[in-house]
Amino acid sequence: MFEPAKTTYQLNDGNQMPVLGFGTYQLTKPALMNQSIQAAYESGYRLFDTAQYYRNEKMLGDAIRNLGVPRQDVFIVDKVTEMNQGHDLTIDSTNFSLQQLGTDYVDLLLVHWPIADKFFETWEAFEELKKQGKARSIGVSNFTRSQLELLKTQADEMPVVNQIETHPYLNQTPLIKFDKDQSIVTQAWSPLGRGVVLDNPMIQKMAAHHEKSPAQIVLRWDIQRGVAVIPKSQTPARIAQNADLNFELSDDEMSMLDVMNRNQRTGNEPELVYELGKQYKQFKK
Ligand SMILES: NC(=O)C1=CN([C@@H]2O[C@H](COP(=O)(O)OP(=O)(O)OC[C@H]3O[C@@H](n4cnc5c(N)ncnc54)[C@H](OP(=O)(O)O)[C@@H]3O)[C@@H](O)[C@H]2O)C=CC1
Ligand SMILES: O=C1CO[C@H](CO)[C@@H](O)[C@@H]1O
């Protein structure tokens, strides 16, 4: 039985993280943010995903406070943007993010993208923020296997979450397996491929069969393959629909979804972003 408010993954640091979360990228108007967070909370979402880059932390913090629920009832994910990486900037910008959100801690703090020239010092700052209780859990986003292996050579503690782009057209099966072997929970960003995968005829056929929408099929596939999801919608009916995942895909349906991969990204290629950091390091020498 999938009950959004109660279904969680056990993280490697002992904390629990909801399997379902709500993405807030591009929600930049207070009224729409309020309405969307209210609808999401009522539908059972407890995790809310933001980033310094989204310029909406204050708005999200206000919308959460407007719910009138205890702080511990929600799970806030924030991310330190490329520009704010490095030891001191990570600490300072996170303190500013906490002020913007109006909270003493985030439940999960992520390195938004791996940047070569700030790689280890950023993570050191993350470990300090965790010790100070400002981040209950620490993780990364858009890290490849080789970047996780590199981090392991110096990290005192490894990330507990890797938030990556994954959907049926970018299934990321090898990285998800590697994450799992390292006790890292994979969280899918753009789980709906920003809408692109919803037109797939085979997904539509499965949706008709289950009397569900294509979005529900894709989100259910993620949950059944052990991946956490953070779909975004500003449409109340879709917000509710994306949390209504109480059905099961057969093994055959799971296999069909598993082989739709086209290596098709909606966002940046993590290795390229990382390499740019390397080039910048050379340039500064
Ligand atoms: N770590 C990272 O680098 C990144 C993290 N993220 C995070 O992941 C979240 C989700 O990814 P995002 O890029 O927003 O894309 P999604 O894959 O969640 O797709 C969002 C789009 O799908 C539409 N949609 C939502 N639900 C349905 C539905 N049931 N039926 C039809 N269409 C639907 C939305 O429309 P509408 O809103 O109009 O309803 C919107 O256009 C972000 O909001 C952000 O929090 C995203 C990108 C990168
Ligand atoms: O979180 C994010 C929102 O989307 C952007 C555009 O694709 C990404 O670059 C960024 O990582």
Image (cartoon, rainbow, N blue to C red):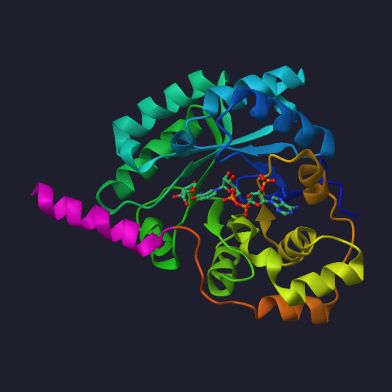
Q: Is residue 253 left or right of residue 106?
A: right
What range of the chain is rendered magenta? Answer: 268-285
Q: Is residue 109 visible?
A: yes
Task: Judge whether 75 appears above or below 4 on screen.
Answer: above
| Residue at point 63%, 19% (across, down) | 62
Q: Quadrant of the N terminus?
A: bottom right
Q: Is residue 187 visible?
A: no
- The one nearer the camera, 208 or 146, is 208
Asked if the magenta segment contains residue 276, the reply would be yes
Q: Position of residue 277 (x, y in %)?
A: 25, 53
Q: Position of residue 73 (x, y in %)?
A: 75, 29
Q: Residue furthest left?
A: 285
Q: Position of residue 141 (x, y in %)?
A: 48, 51
Q: Is residue 111 left or right of residue 192?
A: left
| Residue at point 28%, 46% (across, down) | 118
- The rendered magenta stretch, by its main secondary structure, is classed as helix
- The one nearer the camera, 124 or 231, is 231
Q: Position of residue 172 (x, y in %)?
A: 56, 70
Figure quadrant of residue 45: top right
Figure quadrant of residue 181: bottom right
Asked if the magenta segment contains residue 269, the reply would be yes
| Residue at point 55%, 41% (across, down) | 25
- The one nearer the camera, 285 or 37, is 37
| Residue at point 82%, 74% (across, down) | 205
Total numbered badges shown on the rendered structure: 0
